[in-house]
Image (cartoon, rainbow, N blue to C red):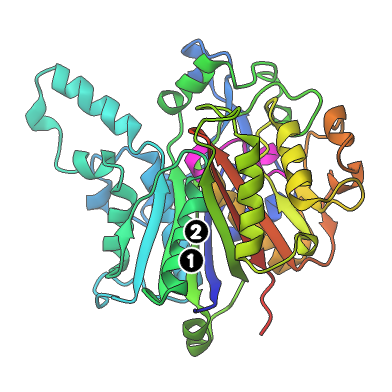
Amino acid sequence: MNRVVITGLGVVAPNGVGLDAFLKAIKNGTSGITFHQQLADLNFSCCIGGIPQISEEKKLEYLTPLQLRGFNSSGILYGCIAGIDAWKDAGLSVEADSELDVDSGTIFGTGTSGVEKFREAIYKLDDKQVKRLGSTVVVQTMASGISAFLGGILGLGNQVTTNSSACTTGTEAILMGYERIKNGQAKRMLVGSCSDDGPYIWGGFDAMRVMTYKHNDSPEKGSRPMSESASGFVPGAGAGALVLESLESALERNATIYAEVLGGNINSGGQRDGGTMTAPNAEAVQRCIKDAITNANISANDIDTINGHLTATSKDGLEIENWTKALHRKGDDFPYINSLKSMVGHCLAASGSIESVATILQLKEQFVFPNINCEDVHPEILELISKEKIITKSLKTDLNIAAKASFGFGDVNGCVIFKKYKK
């Protein structure tokens, strides 16, 4: 079996577009959450969210004027930027006339693609203007639009597909790509996920009353994972991308290696035994974590830090409890744990990949990013783990192994184990 390493990273996040900006933001605890008048005008309870800032000039660095004609799919845009950046970061070609690369593919996930383009098309259809839909409406709105764009731009000749499993999408994509390389079916896989932004993605969550409505006047304070004063999640959007590569191929190319993927696990609670469409089956979550540790061939005691799912809802305490039971570690013995969502909100289908990029940067740079807005840790959590494990200021420390987990709608779970690369 091949060892699998990470040789490229790309990110489009509410608090930073590009690796340098994102790394600076997470080290400093910089929030990307802002107020959006459009949400207020549409009578949303939650009028704040995390939307990456992309200029028109920036778009032209990644997509041609022809590709941008009639283009209205924010998730595909974010995914293309993150994916192309990761490919370049790995030292790989992005030339339009490059040869077909049969050793490289992509598994790039999403939740809903091109919802704004859908809306635009529906209005034209209802107005009997079918001939004015344009030739790109299909690729902008089909679920696999993002992998189709990236596959063509980069000339990928191996597997090119899109996965979708709610908030677990990005973590699942990483593990799917990892398995393909480990089993010798590809040398390189561009993996990641993206999510659209705006009211037509976020409205359903607002209707469910799972988003906070208490911080419209203080957006940066709104996302409060593990906090006693948490009042629901803040929506976000963006994309994260990783180039996974066999260690042999990476060494042959003399590529920069960020970290190694040791393994992981994906499972479901089947919406049984307390699990529902929106709530986790605790036993299945614990089993996912335990099986990820077994698959990675490590001990629970080897984990130095956890980047949790932790959304700032009532389930944060249950997630911590699941970690303590799965690892058999509590109090001062528990690893450091953080939630990127405190800075970027819940980026839905993009969350697992953006948060994995942050996790890998921690291993590469040897630090733990802070949990902002968590000065008042929930008492239920403090009964389980030491407050010192939930840092609120960036911490420089030695890290070797990090776990990243995602738990999504539909009672689906994913956990991936990353390790600092050592020859």
Residue 289 disc label: none
Q: Which picture quadrant has residue 364?
A: bottom right
Q: Position of residue 30 (x, y in %)?
A: 71, 43
- Any magenta on residue 392? no
Q: Secondary structure at mark 2?
A: helix
Residue 378 in view, yes or no: no
Tell me which segment is drawn in magenta: 338-350
Q: Position of residue 67 (x, y in %)?
A: 25, 51
- Any magenta on residue 342? yes
Q: Residue at x 70, y 55 (%)?
A: 24
Q: Position of residue 370 (x, y in %)?
A: 78, 47
* Alpha-carbon span between mark 2 and mark 1: 6 Å
Q: Residue at x 70, y 21 (%)?
A: 231
Q: Secondary structure at mark 1?
A: helix
The amino acid on which the numbered mark 1 sits, given as a three-letter code, is Tyr
The amino acid on which the numbered mark 2 sits, given as a three-letter code, is Ile
Residue at the disc numbered 1: 178
Nearer-the-camera pick, 138 or 387 = 387
For disc 1, the neighbor class at 10 Å (few under 14, some 14 to 19, many from 20) is many
Residue 124 vs 81, above or below: the answer is: above
Q: Are marks 2 and 1 in contact (CB under 8 Å)?
A: yes
Residue at the disc numbered 2: 174
- Number of numbered discs visible in the structure rendering: 2
